[in-house]
């Protein structure tokens, strides 16, 4: 029989989860990966919000509709010469008043390499199972919920939106290039087609998955030495108890509850 | 920038000069923003010999940057006949903007101050309205409207590509410009033929304003 027992129902557990999400703050990451045929560098940040807790005995906390709010900024270079057809202004000959026929040379226009940057923010929701992990960390007992497996993130809509935004970003990045005007639509189409939703998903998926893979949210922290009576006189010191062991579990009594038990010593 | 300015020849531009008088012309290239080099640097040669021949010939000189430094002409020396034209152009978009100027004992030519029987061509790479004038102060003026062509279908694109081989001629004689208004598509080329003038340029007026502001500062 434990010395102390604390119970939290699903409503209280949801509050603990939201406090844990807030404490987790913003997680950041950066790196590079394949964006279709291109290599993109990225910086990304994400935070968790909302979600409701469903307690499943004996030891599963299911968090439903948890929001992963993310911002990602892609940047990639592309050599337009490899995408667009070569444009050569043909030799033009015309008579001028003081010469019979003067001809310009054929002039080929090289397409430059451009850099496309795209910031994008969105929210994906997921449902995932977490397990409880109560452990001593230095002088504190921590109760964490730790994600079980890797949740499936529905990023198709976000990827499609990114691809559309990429089209606009490409159009803006190439608009300044002389002679490209008549080929602009073809350039944007060729680039977005080469990347495709699959290309965006291929990059975005691992970035977002990294944020939730191994996700640990601290829902409860308690100092190991627990003061139960403060000092009142010089000869009457504070009374402390040691929390020797804390355990966490999901139990069913009259309702499903998150149970914390503690063994103490003086 | 794909700007209209005969003082600064770039990829997509050409400058041509008719050599009606015989002589030995030495010339050099001046990089934009720099003072002209002195005559000793005129190390490219055009030998013009007298001729009564009827057919006149065009000679082409390619300008390129050597070792990321000076500009060189290929060929460096030309032998032509009076009445022939020489056209300078560059095929490398990395070549810095330049002008061409030279002289013989009695005559001179300068792409930065077009006097007679000179030609400047410019391929327009972006759409818009360009009001041009003479940066050297003559009362010359013209307007060029560059429109985006229809390229919605393969047929449109074919027609557009075909239209690129059609040049538009603007003739400048004294202070007269004919025509003063030209409408073309992106990618098309305008030929500015200077029959006789007092050292003029063909310059986008926006660039002239920028220069004026810079001088005022």
Image (spheres, coloured by chain):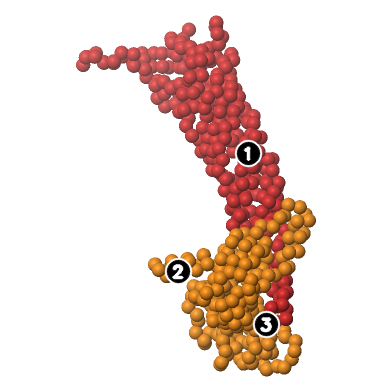
Chain on which label 3 sits: A
Disc 1 and disc 2 in contact, CB within 8 angstroms: no
Query: Is circle 3 on the same chain as circle 1?
Result: yes
Q: Is residue B101 left or right of residue A191?
A: left
Name the residue that disc number 1 marks: A161
Depth check: give the residue in front, B146 or B50.
B146
Task: Check residue B212 in the rendering and tell me which mark sits there, or answer none.
Answer: 2
Circle 3 SS class: loop
- Closest to the observer, A58 or B208: B208
| Structural crowding at the residue carrying mark 3, measured as other residues with C-alpha within 10 Å and reported as few (<14), some (14–19) or many (≥20) | some
Residue B35 picture location, percent across and down:
48, 78
Residue B185 visible at all: yes
Residue at figure coordinates x 64%, y 42% from the top left = A164
What is chain A's hue in the picture?
Answer: red
Q: Residue at x 68, y 59 (%)?
A: A81
Q: Is residue A201 above or below residue A183?
A: above
Q: Which chain is orange?
A: B
């Amino acid at each position: 029989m434990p010395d102390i027992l604390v119970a939290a129902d699903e409503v209280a557990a949801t509050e603990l989860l939201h406090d844990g999400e807030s404490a987790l703050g913003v997680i950041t990451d950066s790196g590079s990966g394949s964006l279709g045929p291109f290599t993109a560098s990225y910086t990304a940040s994400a935070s968790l919000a909302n979600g409701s807790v469903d307690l499943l005995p004996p030891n599963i906390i299911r968090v439903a509709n948890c929001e992963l709010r993310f911002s990602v900024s892609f940047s990639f270079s592309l050599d337009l010469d490899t995408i667009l057809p070569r444009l050569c202004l043909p030799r033009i000959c015309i008579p001028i008043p003081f010469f019979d026929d003067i001809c310009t040379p054929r002039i080929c226009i090289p397409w430059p390499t451009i850099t496309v940057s795209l910031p994008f923010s969105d929210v994906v929701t997921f449902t995932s199972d977490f397990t409880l992990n109560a452990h001593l960390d230095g002088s504190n007992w921590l109760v964490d919920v730790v994600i079980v497996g890797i949740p499936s993130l529905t990023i198709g809509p976000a990827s499609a939106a990114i691809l559309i935004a990429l089209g606009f970003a490409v159009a803006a990045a190439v608009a300044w290039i002389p002679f490209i005007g008549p080929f602009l639509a073809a350039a944007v189409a060729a680039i977005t087609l080469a990347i495709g939703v699959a290309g965006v998903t291929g990059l975005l998926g691992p970035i977002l998955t990294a944020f939730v893979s191994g996700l640990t949210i601290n829902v409860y922290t308690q100092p190991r030495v627990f003061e139960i009576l403060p000092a009142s006189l010089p000869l009457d010191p504070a009374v402390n108890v040691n929390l020797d062991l804390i355990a966490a579990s999901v139990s069913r009594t009259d309702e499903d509850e998150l149970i914390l038990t503690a063994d103490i010593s003086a | 920038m794909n700007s209209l300015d005969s003082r600064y020849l770039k990829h997509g531009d050409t400058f041509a000069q008719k050599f009606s008088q015989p002589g030995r012309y030495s010339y050099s290239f001046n990089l934009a923003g720099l003072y002209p080099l002195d005559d000793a640097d005129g190390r490219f040669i055009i030998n013009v010999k007298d001729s009564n021949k009827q057919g006149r010939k065009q000679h082409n000189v390619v300008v390129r940057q050597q070792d990321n430094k000076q500009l060189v002409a290929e060929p460096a020396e030309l032998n032509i006949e009076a009445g022939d034209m020489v056209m300078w152009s560059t095929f490398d978009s990395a070549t810095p903007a330049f002008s061409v100027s030279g002289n013989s004992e009695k005559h001179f030519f300068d792409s930065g101050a077009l006097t007679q029987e000179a030609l400047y061509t410019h391929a327009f790479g972006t759409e818009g309205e360009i009001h041009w004038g003479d940066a050297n102060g003559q009362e010359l003026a013209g307007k060029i409207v560059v429109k985006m062509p229809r390229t919605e279908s393969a047929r449109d694109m074919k027609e557009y590509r075909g239209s690129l081989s059609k040049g538009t001629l603007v003739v400048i004689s004294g202070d007269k410009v004919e025509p003063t208004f030209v409408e073309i598509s992106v990618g098309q080329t305008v030929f500015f033929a200077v029959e006789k003038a007092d050292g003029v340029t063909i310059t986008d007026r926006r660039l002239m304003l920028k220069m004026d502001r810079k001088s005022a500062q």
